[in-house]
């Protein structure tokens, strides 16, 4: 009963909304409810519709970047503490740690970039 009342009042919420914040993930447009809500918002608001897309992969990218920088810093400090007597060895270990962490970072960024292409395709096909 409560769910039915909520669905029935959706038009009122959408009509009085100044903007729609859409938190997008790849399966977003495969969910009927999400498509229905977006289509209803576009229909009700018409040309003044203000939709703000916020792909969730942007947050994943920033989190991965932060974690990579943190891991690189921790690894550098540990290596410096272990090999402090040999400057060349510290440099070599630091460089190796940087390459390893950078590789891990960029290998984890493949999925968010594919998600971006997926979003572009879905938006191009949405009527």
Image (cartoon, helix red, strand yellow):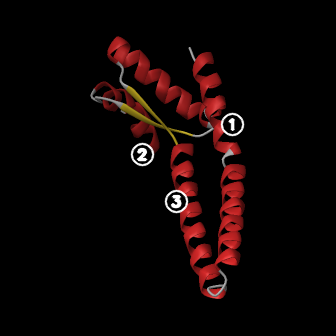
Numbered circle sitting on residue 66 = 3
Judged left or right of residue 125, residue 48 is left
Relative to 5, residue 123 above or below: above
User: What kind of element bears circle 1?
Assistant: helix
Of the pair 24 and 40, the residue shown nearer to us: 24
* Residue sitting at x 56%, y 51%: 60
Judged left or right of residue 12, residue 91 is right
Mark 1 or 3, closer to the camera: 3
Judged left or right of residue 103, residue 124 is left
User: What kind of element bears circle 2?
Assistant: helix
Mark 2 or 1, closer to the camera: 1
Numbered circle sitting on residue 114 = 1
Decide which of tag 2 and tag 1 comes sooner along the chain: 2
* Residue sitting at x 32%, y 32%: 13
The residue carrying pointer 1 sits among few (fewer than 14), some (14 to 19) or many (20 or more) residues within 10 Å by Cα, namely: few
Of the pair 81 and 23, the residue shown nearer to us: 81
In the rendered view of the protein, which quadrant contains the C terminus? top right
């Amino acid at each position: 009963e409560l769910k039915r009342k909520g669905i029935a009042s959706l038009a009122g919420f959408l009509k009085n909304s100044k903007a729609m914040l859409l938190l997008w993930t790849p399966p977003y447009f495969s969910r009927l409810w999400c498509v229905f809500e977006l289509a209803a918002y576009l229909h009700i608001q018409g040309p003044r519709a203000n939709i703000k897309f916020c792909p969730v992969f942007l947050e994943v990218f920033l989190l991965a970047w932060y974690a990579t920088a943190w891991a690189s810093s921790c690894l550098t400090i540990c290596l410096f503490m272990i090999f402090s007597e040999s400057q060349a060895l510290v440099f070599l270990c630091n460089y190796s740690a940087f390459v390893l962490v950078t590789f891990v970072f960029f290998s984890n960024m493949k999925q968010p970039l594919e998600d971006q292409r997926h979003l572009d395709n879905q938006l191009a096909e949405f009527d």
